[in-house]
Image (spheres, grey):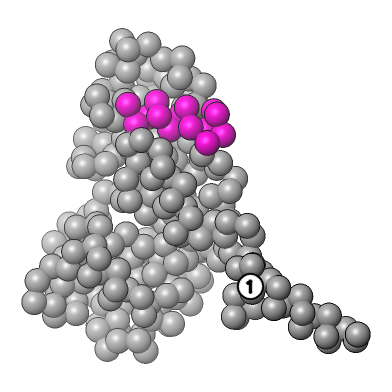
Amino acid sequence: MNSQDVNSRETKQLRAGGLLTRTGYRMGSIGHMMHKITCNADLEEGMAALRPLHPQWAAIIERTGIPPLRRREGGFAGIAAIIVSQQLSVASARAVSARVASVFGQLTPERILAATDEEMRLSGLSRPKQRTMRAVAKAIATQKLDLEALETATPEHVHAMMTAVSGIGPWTADIYLLFCLGHRDGFAPGDLAIQEAARVAFGLPARPNAAELEILAESWRPWRGVAARLLWAYYAVLKSREGVNA
């Protein structure tokens, strides 16, 4: 058997086992080759790819320019920051973040698991956020949530692993995927600002729900992470204010 036969057989086996895509990307057991957004050049590449997909992308880009990169720290600290800021204004999120830092110092799973109820109260976190923070800390400490595995997982697997933790919903997983992992195909179909920006930009009769926006965004793969940033930036332009807290 020659090398071509061996390679052909291996390729078929990899594809049958879900370890090789039709484009030739070799996949891990829970993910695929991770393409990340790390700099403005990556954003520009994605913008160039989106432009021909719909006439409105050119109009959006004309209004927004290069959107903010918005990369942030990952790991437990990154998840904690998302939990703290959820459903809060930028100013309120900063105030609570400052209180959390003053109470706990360096934010680690071990520190949160050792925290007293009084420390949690002093941190300014709501009761649901306290429970979520403890659940995430426990999941990481017991290795039920594998942070290293998230680095190379598909968006779908990141969702599955993160939302398996009590208190973590799709939006939290989406924001971690987009800004902490920097996955170029991350998206946040449940984000109200993205939904409203899409409604206006694409002339939709009503604001799409998460399922409807997910369908619309299918054609934006593998650059949904850039599409999300552009829509957030476009929403900010529409509202004439500074960004949307995420």
Q: Residue at x 32, y 45 (%)?
A: 169
Whether 10 is drawn above or below 162: the answer is: below
Residue 111 placement (x, y as % from top left): 48, 20
Give 209 or 92, whichever is nearer the viewer.
Answer: 209
The amino acid pointed to by label 1 is: Ala
Whether 227 is drawn above or below 58: the answer is: above
Residue 36 placement (x, y as % from top left): 53, 63
Asked if residue 236 shows in the view, the reply is no
Q: Quadrant of residue 129?
A: top left
Q: Residue at x 41, y 15 (%)?
A: 115
Give 70 or 140, whichever is nearer the viewer.
Answer: 140
Q: Residue at x 77, y 79 (%)?
A: 9
Residue 122 placement (x, y as % from top left): 28, 15
3 with respect to 207 (left or right): right
Q: Residue at x 24, y 57 (%)?
A: 191
Instruction: Decide: few, some or many residues near mark 1? Use Cα within 10 Å; few <14, some 14-19, many ≥20.
Output: few
Whether 151 is drawn above or below 12: the answer is: above
Magenta stretch encompasses residue 84: no
Report the predominant secondary structure element of the magenta stretch: helix
211 with respect to 150 (left or right): left
Whether 8 is drawn above or below 206: the answer is: below
Q: Give the residues drawn in magenta, as a range.
A: 131-144
Assign a secondary structure to mark 1.
Answer: helix
Asked if residue 90 shows in the view, the reply is yes
Q: Which residue is mark 1?
A: 16
9 with respect to 95 (left or right): right
Quadrant the N terminus occupies:
bottom right
Magenta stretch encompasses residue 136: yes
Residue 185 placement (x, y as % from top left): 44, 67
